[in-house]
């Protein structure tokens, strides 16, 4: 008669593949969702899946995504006997008994641990990665086991150690080690042995107890060290190096694998409390400032003179970054953030022409036509998904080369996930709560201790909080209500489900009421300034930026009119009458007389001098003015020579001549070959059409539910074919009507396949293979994109990809 423990032991899985076979389909799908690298390509059967789950690269990626306590559980298993009973594992993690089932369940789900509670096993690669060795100490601080540390020790020396420890001698090394291990595992006998130790010897053990377990000794060991070596409480690891055996360290620690098990995450709060309305209001103000900063940046780079060159090695020069920061009136790190944000959003790129420069893309013009809330959601979504880190600008790479804005070396794969996790912690707090950055960083250290490296992870957390405030995702440190839908959309896409397309719409609809309505007026003042008490309509702002210089920014923008700014408007094609009409139409106060006089005075002098391109020349109907210029000693460097009463020839090029004459107080205008005034518009420079840069992938993309279902079916079918499991009942497939493959128009075929992919239903397709042979397949489409359909093929019982041009038609499988 078979007893229950014997039956359970016989039924226990002998390998990881056996355990995977016993899992239901939803558990297999959970494994593939958590470790998407196992799907590239789809494994042929469960044995292949188990082998791939034990590959070093895959195991490293799985360990990176464990929280602190799950990782501590795996580390404890790595130093425990193999296999390890549940009770012994719990004893290694005192204080974590309540959370241990969760951690163990997570490790089992991700196939890092397998076996029943009486025989828990780490996959071999994980044990190799986490177990201590001479070259790589364990994160637990434990050293090698007694058997590992005494490997190669002579049998005679082992017997001497037994005698010194007060144990009877044995006949072979194996029994000698068992006797020592029994001593170290017996609390009373171990306490008695340690009680005999000299005080210096106990102090040495205390230093090595929590790791690192290796210590350096002199060529002639001191008496305390000699005492420890004689009793195997320390063992030689190399010349002048000793190691504390794992069994001794565990006894000294009271059986704990870690100094401080961390079963629960540290709290993020309490933080500074704000009312949600205050956070939203502050965030909305930052939204307007962010939009203004991006518009000002791209406006600066929209001109021939303002577009910065691309360095030969790629990226933006340090001088250009400084110049841009001064123009935007921000620090260089903030300027780098706006530049990288515009680049990530596809609004900025290099033109690819000879003498390559950075300039706005055509997408910038379309972006400007959108309402403010939609412009902001475009920027925020690009920031959430970006792998380029503006915070790295100014630092150095592994080769000590300076990292520049828009240059190579700024991509970090974990950045989007860490950014999402950081904001997710803010979202989990009560609305209006602004947690401390250190608390958020400590929480992420617990949630993903191996992700990205401790130093980089902490920097990304702090950069995320700073950039979120600049962008208006947070207001006074608290997550805003209108940013939450974007986090939900980003999280959905990261988990492999279809992104919530309503997220941007919801964010825009929540943000719109918080933004001030654009104004169509300014307040003109007698001191040649204009005050815009709020954001202006775009066309009004563009004209005003041409006609005046921005003197100060903030809740209200102050513009100052100068002779140079008025001349700039005249150069752009505006006449004096146009400017008077513009100011009268858009000012809530009367146009001050000094401003009207300034416009008329500059307009009267504007264009009297004409600079052309013959070498260059200056033309003017006023021969007295030309004679005055020719006699001006300050213009001697231009090489002016009077050719006719109304024409001066110059040795300088036209651009230099224009600039120099204006510096001397004149108001020349450029002239075309036909004698017309050349109108200079500042917003004419654009790159050819460019797409936004793709974020650097951090591993395979998370699979969606249809692909997971198809992959599980394919793996099960392959396992049956390989003899690993009994065959499952197959879904009956109806015979084709008339025995002919379906033939439908291409548009109808595409529509049927897409509908089946959405519903998860089977379709019958006509297919022509590479040899030109026509046939029929019954498939369940998973993905239809890029000219291919990926589907679970019921005929072959595996996931296959078919080119759409080889599919002659499609019809529902039940038709």
Image (cartoon, helix red, strand yellow):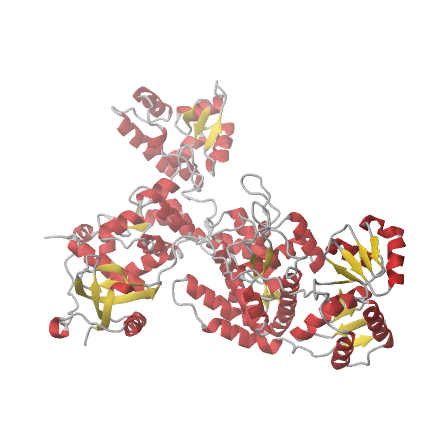
Q: Is residue 815 left or right of residue 334?
A: left
Res 734 seen here: yes
Compared to residue 711, the image places residue 533 above or below, namely below
Which residue sits furthest top? 220
Residue in view at x 50 percent, y 74 percent: 505
Report how many numbered discs are placed on residues in the image: 0
Q: Is residue 116 left or right of residue 136?
A: left
Front-lying residue, 482 or 677: 677
Location of residue 395 in the rendering, given as x and y in whole percent from the top left corner: 60, 45
Front-lying residue, 475 or 352: 352
Res 265 seen here: no
Quadrant housing the C terminus: bottom left
Which residue sits furthest front? 644
Which residue sits furthest left? 1
Compared to residue 185, the image places residue 482 above or below, namely below
Compared to residue 277, the image places residue 325 above or below, namely above
Location of residue 223 in the rendering, given as x and y in whole percent from the top left corner: 48, 21
Q: Is residue 222 left or right of residue 327?
A: left
Location of residue 127 in the rendering, given as x and y in whole percent from the top left corner: 35, 42
Residue in view at x 56 percent, y 62 percent: 361
Location of residue 305 in the rendering, given as x and y in whole percent from the top left corner: 68, 57
Quadrant of the image occupied by residue 227: top left
Residue in view at x 30 percent, y 25 percent: 168
Front-lying residue, 134 or 64: 64
């Amino acid at each position: 008669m078979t007893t229950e423990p014997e039956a359970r032991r016989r039924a226990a899985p002998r390998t990881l593949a056996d355990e995977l076979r016993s899992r239901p389909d939803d558990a297999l799908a959970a494994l593939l969702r958590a470790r998407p690298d196992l799907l590239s390509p789809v494994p042929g059967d469960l044995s292949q899946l188990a082998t791939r789950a034990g590959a070093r690269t895959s195991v490293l990626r799985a360990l990176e995504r464990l929280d602190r306590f799950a990782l501590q559980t795996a580390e404890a298993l790595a130093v425990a006997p193999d296999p390890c009973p549940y009770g012994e594992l719990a004893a290694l993690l005192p204080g974590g008994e309540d959370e241990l089932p969760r951690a163990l369940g997570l490790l089992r789900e991700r196939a890092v641990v397998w076996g029943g509670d009486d025989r828990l096993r780490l996959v071999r690669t994980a044990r190799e990665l986490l177990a201590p060795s001479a070259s790589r100490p364990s994160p637990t601080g434990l050293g090698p086991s007694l058997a590992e540390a005494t490997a190669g020790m002579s049998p005679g020396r082992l017997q001497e150690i037994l005698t010194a420890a007060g144990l009877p001698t044995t006949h072979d090394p194996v029994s000698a080690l068992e006797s020592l291990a029994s001593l170290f595992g017996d609390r009373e006998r171990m306490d008695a042995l340690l009680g005999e130790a000299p005080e210096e010897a106990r102090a040495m053990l205390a230093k090595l107890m929590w790791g690192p377990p290796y210590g350096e000794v002199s060529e002639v060991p001191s008496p305390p060290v000699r005492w420890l070596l004689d009793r195997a409480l320390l063992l030689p690891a190399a010349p002048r190096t000793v190691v504390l055996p794992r069994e001794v360290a565990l006894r000294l620690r009271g059986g704990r694998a870690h100094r401080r098990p961390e079963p629960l995450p540290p709290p993020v709060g309490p933080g500074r409390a704000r009312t949600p309305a205050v956070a939203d209001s502050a965030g909305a103000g930052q939204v307007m400032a962010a939009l203004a900063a991006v518009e000002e940046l791209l406006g600066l780079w929209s001109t021939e003179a303002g577009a910065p060159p691309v360095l030969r090695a790629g990226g933006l020069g340090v001088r250009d970054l400084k110049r841009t920061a001064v123009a935007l009136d921000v620090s260089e790190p903030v300027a780098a953030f706006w530049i990288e944000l515009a680049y990530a959003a596809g609004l900025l790129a290099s033109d690819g022409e000879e003498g390559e420069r950075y300039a706005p893309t055509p997408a910038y013009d379309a972006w400007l036509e959108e309402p403010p809330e939609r412009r902001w959601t475009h920027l925020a979504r690009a920031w959430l998904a970006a792998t380029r880190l503006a915070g790295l600008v100014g630092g150095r790479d592994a080769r000590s080369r300076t990292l520049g804005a828009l240059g190579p070396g700024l991509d970090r794969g974990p950045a989007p996930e860490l950014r999402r996790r950081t904001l997710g912690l803010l979202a989990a707090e009560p609305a209006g709560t602004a947690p401390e950055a250190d608390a958020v960083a400590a929480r992420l250290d617990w949630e993903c201790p191996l992700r990205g490296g401790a130093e980089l992870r902490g920097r990304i957390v702090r950069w995320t909080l700073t950039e979120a405030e600049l962008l208006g995702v947070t207001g006074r440190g608290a997550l805003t209500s209108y940013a939450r839908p974007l986090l939900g959309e980003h999280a959905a896409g990261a988990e492999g489900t279809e992104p919530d397309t309503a997220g941007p719409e919801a964010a825009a609809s929540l943000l719109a009421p918080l933004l001030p309505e654009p104004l169509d007026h300014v307040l003109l003042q007698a001191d040649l300034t204009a005050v815009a008490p709020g954001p202006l309509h775009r066309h009004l702002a563009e004209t005003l930026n041409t006609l005046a210089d921005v003197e100060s920014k903030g809740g209200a923008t102050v513009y100052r009119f100068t002779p140079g700014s008025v001349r700039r408007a005249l150069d752009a094609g505006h006449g004096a009458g146009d400017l008077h009409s513009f100011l009268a139409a858009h000012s809530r106060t009367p146009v001050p007389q000094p401003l009207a006089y300034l416009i008329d005075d500059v307009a009267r002098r504007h264009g009297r001098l004409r600079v052309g391109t013959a070498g260059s020349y200056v033309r003017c109907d006023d021969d007295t003015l030309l004679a005055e210029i020719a006699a001006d000693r300050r213009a001697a460097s231009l090489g002016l020579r009077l050719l006719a009463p109304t024409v001066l020839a110059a040795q300088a090029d036209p651009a230099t001549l224009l600039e120099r004459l204006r510096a001397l107080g004149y108001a020349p205008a450029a002239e075309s070959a036909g004698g017309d005034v050349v109108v200079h518009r500042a917003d004419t420079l654009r790159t050819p059409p460019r797409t936004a840069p793709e974020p650097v992938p951090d591993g395979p993309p998370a699979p969606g539910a249809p692909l997971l279902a198809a992959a599980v079916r394919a793996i099960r079918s392959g396992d049956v074919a390989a003899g690993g499991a009994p065959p499952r009942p197959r879904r009956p497939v109806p015979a084709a009507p008339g025995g002919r493959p379906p033939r439908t128009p291409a548009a109808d075929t595409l529509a049927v396949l897409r509908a089946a992919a959405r519903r998860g239903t089977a379709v019958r397709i006509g297919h022509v293979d590479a040899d030109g042979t026509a046939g029929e397949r019954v498939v369940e489409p998973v993905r239809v994109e890029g000219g291919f359909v990926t589907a679970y093929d019921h005929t072959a019982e595996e996931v296959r990809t078919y080119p759409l041009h080889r599919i002659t038609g499609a019809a529902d499988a039940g038709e």
